[in-house]
Amino acid sequence: MSLFDSVSEIAKGFSSGGDHAAVAGGLMQELGGTGGVAGLIQQFQKNGAGGLVQQFAGGQTQAADPGAIEQALAGSGLIDGIAQRTGMSPDTVKSSLATILPVLISHVTANGHVTTDGQPTGNPMPDAGSLMQSVLGKLL
């Protein structure tokens, strides 16, 4: 069973899985598991979106503007990669990422897995399934 399938199965346990579950699974595959979250945060920093990371890390986990997420991920190929993996449009992926990423970044920074500048802390990341179950549990 792939990570995408595992996340989809987890999402079925919630009231509605929908696009967020599929995008979350595609995100974890594109990031190469949980270790890629640090690189994701570094991409935000590189593209001048460090303020968003600070907001998310500070607990502001309401959905972000999809345009801001697109700008923060510019040059990474992440949105198109998830769209190809899931069969969804890039616009749908951006909208879901705008909801998922604030919760994901808040979770990994608040639990001391990675700093707001994308540096690992030495506190090991949970496995991808546990991480996505935590994030989806807050969303669904």
Image (cartoon, rainbow, N blue to C red):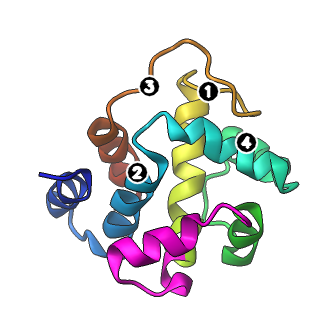
The residue beneath circle 4 is 42
Earlier residue among tags 2 and 4: 2
**Mark toward the viewer: 4 or 3:** 4
Q: Which quadrant would residue 34 be assigned to in this image?
A: top left
Which residue occupies 70% across, 33% down? 118
**Label for residue 3?**
none
**Majority secondary structure in the magenta region:** helix
User: Which amino acid type corresponds to the residue marked 3 in the rendered image?
Assistant: Met
Per the model, the C-alpha gap separating discs 2 and 3 is 13 Å
- What crowding class fits label 4: few (fewer than 14 Cα within 10 Å), some (14-19), or many (20 or more)? many
Compare marks 2 and 3 and give the one earlier in the sequence: 2
Question: Is there any visible trace of residue 59 in the rendered image?
Answer: no
Give the CA separation, mark 4 to mark 1. 11 Å
In the picture, the disc for residue 114 is 1
Q: Is residue 110 left or right of residue 56?
A: left
- Asked if the residues shown at circle 4 and circle 3 are in contact, with their CB atoms under 8 angstroms apart, the answer is no
What is the distance, in whole Å, between disc 1 and disc 2 at their CAs? 16 Å
Which tag, 1 or 2, sits closer to the chain's start? 2
Q: Amino acid at mark 2?
A: Met
Rendering coords of residue 126 (x, y %)? 37, 27
Q: What crowding class fits label 1: few (fewer than 14 Cα within 10 Å), some (14-19), or many (20 or more)? A: many
Residue 91 picture quarter? bottom right
Q: Contact (CB < 8 A) between labels 3 and 1?
A: yes
Viewer-nearest of discs 1 and 2: 2
Depicted 33 relative to depicted 114: above or below? below
Residue lying farthest left?
1
The answer to whether residue 31 is magenta is: no
Per the image, label 1 sits on a secondary structure element best described as loop
Magenta stretch bounds: 74-93
Marker disc for residue 28: 2
